[in-house]
Image: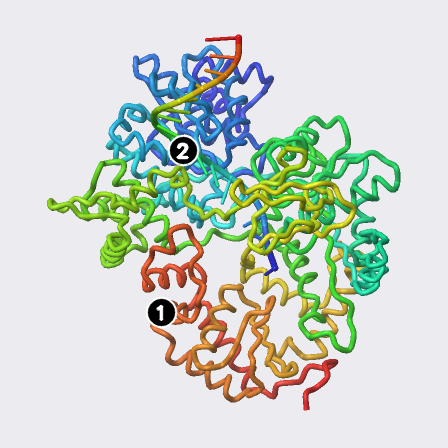
Amino acid sequence: MSDESYSTVFERLAPAMQRWIWRQGWEQLRPTQEAAAPLILAGDSDVLISAATAAGKTEAAFLPALSNAVSALARGESPLLLYVAPLKALINDQRFRLEGMLEGVDLMLTPWHGDVGETARKRFRAQPGGVLLITPESLEAFFVHQGNRLLTFFGGVQHVIVDELHAFPGSERGRQLQSLLDRLELVVGRRIPRIGLSATMGNLELAAEYLRPHDGSSVAIIKADEGEQALRVQLRGYEHTPARLSEKEAIAIEATGSEVAIEDVTDGDTLAVRDDLFRVLRGSNHLVFANARHTVELFADLLRRKCQSEKVPQEFFPHHGSLSKQLRQDTEARLKEGLKPTTAICTSTLEMGIDIGSVESIAQIGAPYQVSALRQRLGRSGRRGEPAVLRIYINEDAITPQTPLLDRLRGELFQATAMVELLLQGWCEAPRAGRLHLSTCLQQVLSLICQYGGVTARDLWRALAERGPFGRTLTKPMLVELLRVMGEHDLIIQADDGLLLHGERGEQIVNHYDFYVTFPTSEEFTLYYKGRPMGMLPIDGPLAVGQLLIFAGRRWRVDEIDPTAKAIMLSPSSGGTPPLFSGAGGQVDGKVREAMRTLYLSGIAPRYLSRGAKLLFEQGVASFRTHELGSIPVILDGEQLLCLPWAADRVIDTLALALLRQGIGATREQFALAIQSRDVDRVRDALVAFINAPPASAEVLAELVPTQVQEKYDPYLPPELLNADYAARALDLPGALRIAEELLPAFKAVIPQAQGKPENV
DNA sequence: GACCTGCTGCGGCGTG
């Protein structure tokens, strides 16, 4: 950037913003800020700014947007800058950053989310304008409760800033936000320039289409030059070794009244991971990511006990979404202050947004599901100029003559390695497009009725589809069917003049505060110790008084369960197992599977693999070669045919359903398609039939899935719509057809037999 | 073989 253009942009900012820049001691603006400012100042286009964390995205958006607000003030207007973020904590952080920028500027700053008190709300309602920092849910509440005053509150809006944009596409919340932003434009009667702030994403064109549905190509995309941050990776591999005591021995010892130490019943390889974490992480700040909350609890407990037995200060703390706000904030504050060495063992809670400062290294237990998540996690590591450090820990089963072929392939190690390779290549997943989002559509219908006090079907079509974000996938017959079934459930009624109003049930739903949230929430019990809340535990399985569990990195006994208050009283205990939290599986991208195949074919272990990991890698390659999976990706494995399509989970699921439809049992097992048949000819004929006469749509296959209800308002959808929604969400028919063709030659070849597994005669 | 996110308006009562 030349001096001339620097000064040009700088001089166009409001004097108050210039003073703020001086106070920061900035000698120049960053290229992203230079590029964004003229576009935002002009106020006639949407802008998507994509950069790694801490790259000055917030300033790139706010310095010019606030400058526009200052100009409007000077013209005697009352401008509004609307900022939407996915996390309350992010709004609280941004509030303090913006306070400095607003010094000497007559703009009110209003954070607005569920924890914000009535006083601040009253102040904004009395004098709308300034900067409003809000969540999608609280914005929804405005439409529900202030439908006839929206113009008063939002009439002056000049820009909408969407922070952490990458968190939105593909989800219910994402669609809800798109709908609300469009409804806002409908209310003010003009296009409001949108500014999206995003981490690196796999496909910025799709992100732009998210930001401005129907017109993504008009969005100006500004991508920061990430620079060359060095990355140091190590991937450590462990083969399973048994615990010191078997389960039987442990039970026998407990029966005599003696206590069994947790270390004696924990697998040897798990303890080895603990020991390595303890050895390398002690003394500074780190994040250890685990894929599941119970893994977080297990390692937090093992490391805490290790600190105790070694008589050193405690510095390992758990952090996940079911822990109480207090416990989480204590850990966050300890990390941020940086006074005492601190390692948080966490789930994706510490992946995004909240300011915890940077940490020295990142550890990851188990293969991640998405490269984009790995990249986000890595973004937390590496102070300026220092390399980011990543350690991945992979545990695989020990190999015995009984070990199934799939486990011999060391899939988790190869998945983790493939993801690191893709990370190094700069690739990451693109958001999923093409979903119907009928659950969210139903919610928006109810919300629109609140806003306008009644709407016609024609109004709904115009608002949601013609100009709104549902237009790409929602058809008129679908909307008509949705409205019909909403009437059946008494969610809506039609007045004599054709106006749609809330039915009795619809009234109940919109009047409950849960209505603004568009994703489903499970019933959770609060855990108490000495009257102090420790966190929330989702209860799906049986839980009994006297049961032992690990929570918040400690061991507990359940003393009392109060179902009405949804409360569980605990007391400390020495035994316990981590609670199991339920959940559906992740979805791995096809590109990751392809990268795995490349690794198997090359047989060359990358240098960042530890000796143990290299050993597992070589075992995987050996099994792959022994069974000639490179040339024929199908093998007879006991009573089943095991097939390796090297495709996305969604594609394998679709293939399994295609076979199921023809009477052949098939399921996805890890990255394989397990076909419950030894009859190669029959499977080949089924594949040929699938290719030559494919089902008319993925919906035909989706009908075979009994568990389609997943989203909040799914229970209200009629079978056909639910089925269509599920098919668009979970299946990929074109992908499955492509892979079926690729697989077909293998089923024409002589299929080898897996070794090492006893044959049923 | 999963994780995360979020929540109004109003009445009643106590306190400074």
Quadrant location of residue A526?
Answer: top right
Q: In x, y percent, where is residue A590?
A: 54, 62
Mark 2 lies on a secondary structure that is helix
Position in image of residue A523 (x %, y %): 51, 47
Q: Categorize mark 2 by other alpha carbons within 10 Å: few (<14), some (14-19), many (20+).
A: some
Pick the front one: A92 or A40: A92
Horizontal relation, residue A666 to residue A81: left or right: right
The residue identified by callout 2 is A138
Q: Residue at x 29, y 35 (%)?
A: A185
Please give left or right for residue A440 compared with residue A34 in the image.
left
Residue type pointed to by label 2: Ser
Q: Residue at x 78, y 44 (%)?
A: A303
Q: Amino acid at mark 1?
A: Ser
Applied colour scheme: rainbow
Residue furthest bottom as drawn: A761
Which image quarter holds the C terminus of chain A? bottom right
Q: Position of residue A460 (x, y in %)?
A: 23, 46
Q: Is residue A378 above or below residue A589?
A: above
